[in-house]
Image (cartoon, rainbow, N blue to C red):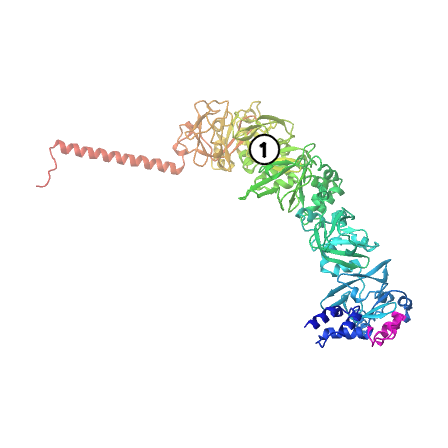
Amino acid sequence: MTNFLEFTRVTETLEIGNCQNYKSLKLRLMFLGPIHIPTRILTSLLACVTNHGVFAKERPKTVYDLLNNNPDFSSLVKFINEHGLKKDLTGDNVTVLAPLNEAFEKYQEKESAYFLTTRKITTNDVLYHILPVAVESENLYDGQLLKSLYYKNEIPQMIKVNVDDNGIYVGNIQIKERDLLADNGVVHSIDTFLTAPLDLDRALQKDKDLHSFNELASKTDLIYKLSDSDGYTIFTAEDNLDGLDDKQKSYLHSPSAKDDLKKFLGHQIHNSLLYTHEIPEGTSQLKTWGEDLEITKTKHGKITVNGVRIIRSDILVSNGVIHYLEGSILPSKKFWDFDTRKTMLAMNATKFVNLLEDNGLGNYLKEADTRGYTFIVPTDEALETTDLSKKETVSWLKYHIIDRVYNPKDFVNGALLQTESTDQLGDAKQRLRVHVNDQDDALKQNIQFGRSGTAGSPYNSKESIMYPIHRPLDLPRDPLRRLPVDLELSSFVAAIYASSSEDVITDAKGITLFAPTNDAFGRLGLLYKHLLHPDSKNKLQELIKFHAVKRLFYGAETEKGEHKVTTLQGSDLVLNKTGDGIYLRGSGAADGSDRSVIAKIVEYDTLVSNGVVHKIDRVELPKSLEVTNRDLLSAQTSTSFLDLLRRVDLSKEILDGPNEHYTILAPSDKAISKIDLEELINDHEKLKRVVKLHILPTLIPRVNMLNGKRDDSLFDMGSTYNDNDIHREITLAGVDFDTLLSNDDKIVIRTTPMGYSVSVKGSLQEGADVTDVGRSSTGGGVIEIDRLLMPYDDSSVSGLSWWSVIFIVLGVMMGAAILAYLIYFMYIWWKRRRDGRIALDDV
């Protein structure tokens, strides 16, 4: 047993082809007894005996001679002779990693599979197998780098050695036969051609450990720059961006961040070759294209870069070396001093940044780092190519910029933010509505700008804040494109076109437009019909212009109290903001609370391109608008009552007088058609009495109609008025009015469940229902009724309707019958009592 241990200790290096102890072995074997020698050691021993022992042949003088004398290398020798490489094998200290003949055959088969014609072996292919130093196998170790005679761009191409239990490998090819010695060097045989290091671009593509660096470098021109350099060292990891936040990663991936991405990767590049065996022990600083790296090498060979361990060293490429790290190495914080522009690029908003810069708005990006803005930023996915003109594009882009920093907690639901867009508003800034919905989680807040929702959390730069959105903002549209969308404003839109006021409204800059609803126009009754008549076009335009004021009034920003403002029509309109809302007062109001005329804003702040629109529930009339009772009568479907006024010579006095404080009860054309008009006309005196009965010498009462029915929305007013000099309110009990006929001939107007009724006081004739109303600009007006009224003393039973006569006759007859029955019953009772007859109960 002792002999075997001694033998093993002496011959242990033979397992790796080391014959330097052969002489010592030979002497000791003489003193050892019989032993069992393992086969693997016996093989190595025989090789050493052959080369160094009594059976060893004389060494060839040169490596070339050694190869030339061995038929297994005939293909290699032939190539050496044909290409004049013999001189490289006859100098001092040469090592040849000699491809066997079979290696040549494998090479041809492999290359023919890739190329249409067989690729020839080049001189450089063979020079890569020759080392300018004699290295026997005993001096080869794991991770060793060997310099070959093959130079590419003046850089020697290296071969990496790997050693494991199975043998020794050069460039991943196992050495078959080691240490064939010549006087000037050594030969190690291999059965496959070595492949020289790949160029950088191919190495990055093929090696999965280098994919992260390849992906990032491909976004810049870095690969081309590295490929043209004379040698460099790269430090990389599985994910070179690991440790960055989402904002930083997104920025480096953006197309516009190429320069900064190159600087980022430059932090991992040393400008010359540095193999691990050249790194000194201890800690040293290494210059890079960016910040210096700190490299530490322990006495055991462990190497770290900025504290991150190298786990795969010396990955060879044709003009450099790459070291693979356990994790990423990142630049210091000062590299991430993001300005507003970089932050937008990090938000994937490259298109928006380019649009700002291409349209002369890049100063906003620069100023944002010192003064602070709020940017509403559409991402690249949301932003399509705009078809707007240059001017429109500038205005649209500025609509995404707010000259103040709004953090999420600063927003108030429904607030109007002042943007930097001023087109069509004069000196004022266009507004942007913000909607805020707080969710259950206090950290989550749903913010919407206009119709655009946020696409994630906001980003902060030095002084500004940016909100990513799913879709770009829409500039407020032209009023005549925005208003038709609201069906409640169709009458107002129709009035604008009917009066040819389109240009007046759209060309005005910085206006507030008060848009009456359809019901508001319906309340005008006969006046609206008159204004829509082609002959009233100028009046209608005057009315439209009266609803546009030359200032911007936003609901929440209007101060309380009265504001007298000038309209586009030229006269003033009074705004009054109270705790109950904002009211508008033109002309014709009986008092400050007359809601039959005074309008209230019912919907605020519809943004349009040249201002803001508020929806109101009444149409306001300017003082200069002249509408007479003649105009109102002419607006009916016929002029029958107007003709009757002319026949009795009252038209000039009633319709054309200087003071038209008259209210005319005008039977409709249909109502007049039900009477014997010819008979009435022939009795001139009676006709005059009938016409005067329909004329009230007073301002028009508060008979407020909407679509032919009473407008109950106005019945919240306080007191009742009895003075003829004001617009009197109508009640359920009825209100008496004098007529032009006489002070004794009065008209009673009262409310009914469906509207209003008009009757002659004291008369039994059927009253009339009110079907429409119109107010003149002087305070009078026309009340359209569905029946012609007759004076009290001219009315008779025959004048009543047939069913009224029947009702009266039946009532009289029934009353007489009941009275007769009662008289008869009392007579019978009295007679029986007088005769002493009484009723007795049965016994």
Question: Is residue 10 visible to the viewer in this orientation of the structure?
Answer: yes
Residue 290, magenta (yes or no):
no
Rendered location of residue 47, percent (x, y): 79, 74
Quarter where residue 52 is shown: bottom right
Residue 53, magenta (yes or no):
yes
Q: Is residue 512 left or right of residue 142?
A: left
Q: Is residue 185 left or right of residue 296?
A: right
Q: Which residues are magenta?
A: 52-80
Most foreground residue, 102 or 198? 102
- The amino acid type found where label 1 is placed reads Gly
Most foreground residue, 92 or 289? 92
Most foreground residue, 170 or 361? 170
Local crowd size for mark 1, using a 10 Å CA cut-off: few (<14), some (14–19), many (≥20): some
Most foreground residue, 549 or 155? 155
Secondary structure under tag 1 reads helix
Position of residue 387 relative to residue 739, above or below, is below
Question: Is residue 189 visible to the viewer in this orientation of the structure?
Answer: no
> Going by the picture, which residue comes out furthest to the front?
31
Position of residue 842 relative to residue 748, above or below, is below
Rendered location of residue 323, percent (x, y): 75, 56
* Residue located beneath label 1 in the image: 555
